[in-house]
Image (tube, coloured by chain):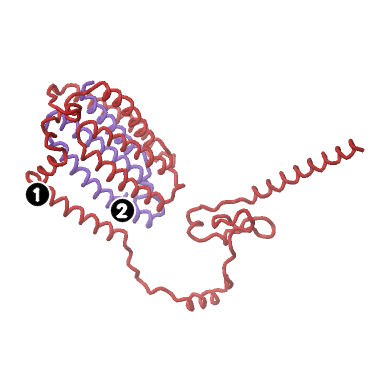
């Protein structure tokens, strides 16, 4: 098997995640789709690391994981405070600044 | 060369089989994540996809990342997601009402085009080199990563430490609510009740049947209609009151029918024996 297949799988997962961000309304599910996109990028990084024979790709993937953890904490805190204010987790309801 | 380093530098048939089976499951899990209506189901499907990605990391020679993926992503992050789903309400399903006309189809078309672009880009790239991690992993994967993190990437590592602290403090600030007024005492609350004259005695308890004493089942008034007052305020706001009055009537009807059948049969048997 050609290891480029891992890249194709990563591209497919990234595309599915992007479609989910566009389609879904529930803020939590949108956030999960963002996580899916980050994971797909990590898979691509790991596959690149193996192709080029050095560990730099794995280190970038590791940093992506750390940043994703920080992002999830802040994002979920925002969702919880939004839910407290509006009693809904739908991204359509957060339209206070719309004209 | 040991078996592990060999496996990390060449794709075997076993890895191809693993890729095609687990890759299919990963894509199905990702599709279920965006297609399931309830957020809990989406979270579980995403957790499955993440575990499979961890297996792929291990197969690609990233042993440290594979373990970290399971511990951090499926262990910590997905559990955080599930906690927030519980806070926001498990039963809250996505609305199917479209606020923008044809938004779903446009989104699907955009995603399709984007996917084709990505695939074409990968297909056109000259990815002929395939060195494998045999040499890089020779001194151990964890040791190699540690050496790089604490030499080349040490500043990035320290900045991520600052980022994590900031994120933790930020989450606490965002979810913390300062009490702006003094909490009312029990005496003041009781005086308020008497002054309003609306509900002076304590509120009635929910669930009047022996088989339904759950808090989300409303107690019944004498005429059989459910009394919303008996269910607590939070559940009432979420609209999570369960109405079992018709269920109970159905049960009673079924019981009567069964007893009638039984009695009728008993009478038949008596007549037959006579």
Image quadrant containing the C terminus of chain B = top right
Q: Which mark is residue B155?
A: 1
State which quadrant residue B2 falls in: top left
Pinpoint residue B131: horizontal percent, then vertical percent: 12, 26
Task: Using residue B129 as the reference point, say whether residue A97 is left or right of it.
Answer: right
> Which image quarter: residue B259?
top right
| Side of B193 relative to B268 (left or right) | left
Residue B132 location (% of width, % of height): 15, 28
Residue A14 in the image: above or below residue B92 = above
Q: Is residue B31 above or below residue B205?
A: above
Q: Position of residue B74 (x, y in %)?
A: 31, 43
Residue B16, position in %: x, y?
A: 27, 23
Foreground residue among A39 and B204: A39
Q: Which residue is mark 2?
A: A78
- CA separation, marks 1 and 2? 29 Å
Chain B as rendered: colour:
red
Chain to which the residue tagged by mark 1 belongs: B
Residue density around tag 2, few if under 14, some if 14–19, many if 20 or more, within 10 Å: some
Element at label 2? helix
Q: Colour of chain A?
A: purple
Q: Which residue is at 17% across, 21% downward? A: B124
């Amino acid at each position: 098997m050609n290891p480029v297949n891992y890249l194709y799988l990563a591209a497919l997962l990234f595309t599915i995640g992007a479609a989910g961000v566009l389609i879904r309304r529930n803020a939590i599910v949108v956030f999960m789709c963002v996580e899916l996109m980050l994971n797909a990028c990590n898979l691509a990084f790991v596959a690149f690391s193996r192709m080029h024979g050095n560990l730099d790709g794995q280190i970038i993937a590791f940093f992506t994981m750390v940043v994703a953890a920080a992002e999830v904490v802040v994002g979920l805190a925002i969702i919880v405070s939004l839910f407290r204010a509006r009693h809904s987790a739908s991204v359509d309801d957060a339209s206070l600044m719309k004209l | 060369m040991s078996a592990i380093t060999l496996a990390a530098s060449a794709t075997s048939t076993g890895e191809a089989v693993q890729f095609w089976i687990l890759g299919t499951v990963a894509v199905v899990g990702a599709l279920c994540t965006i297609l399931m209506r309830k957020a809990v189901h989406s979270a579980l499907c995403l957790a499955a996809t993440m575990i499979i990605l961890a297996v792929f990391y291990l197969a690609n020679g990233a042993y440290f990342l594979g373990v970290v993926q399971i511990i951090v992503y499926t262990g910590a992050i997905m559990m955080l997601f599930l906690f927030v789903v519980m806070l926001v309400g498990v039963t809250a399903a996505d609305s199917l009402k479209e606020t923008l006309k044809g938004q779903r189809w446009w989104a699907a078309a955009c995603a399709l085009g984007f996917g084709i672009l990505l695939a074409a880009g990968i297909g056109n790239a000259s990815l002929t080199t395939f060195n494998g991690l045999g040499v890089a992993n020779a001194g151990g994967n964890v040791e190699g990563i540690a050496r790089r993190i604490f030499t080349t990437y040490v500043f990035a590592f320290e900045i991520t430490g600052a980022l994590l602290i900031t994120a933790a403090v930020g989450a606490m600030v965002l979810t913390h609510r300062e009490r702006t007024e003094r909490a009312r005492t029990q005496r003041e609350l009781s005086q308020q009740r008497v002054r309003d004259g609306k509900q002076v005695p304590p509120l009635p308890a929910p669930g009047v049947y022996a088989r339904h004493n759950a808090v989300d089942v409303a107690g019944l008034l004498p005429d059989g209609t459910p009394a919303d007052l008996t269910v607590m305020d939070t559940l009432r706001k979420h609209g999570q009151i369960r109405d079992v009055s018709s269920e109970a009537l159905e049960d009673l009807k079924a019981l009567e029918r069964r007893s009638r059948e039984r009695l009728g049969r008993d009478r038949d048997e008596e007549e037959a024996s006579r």
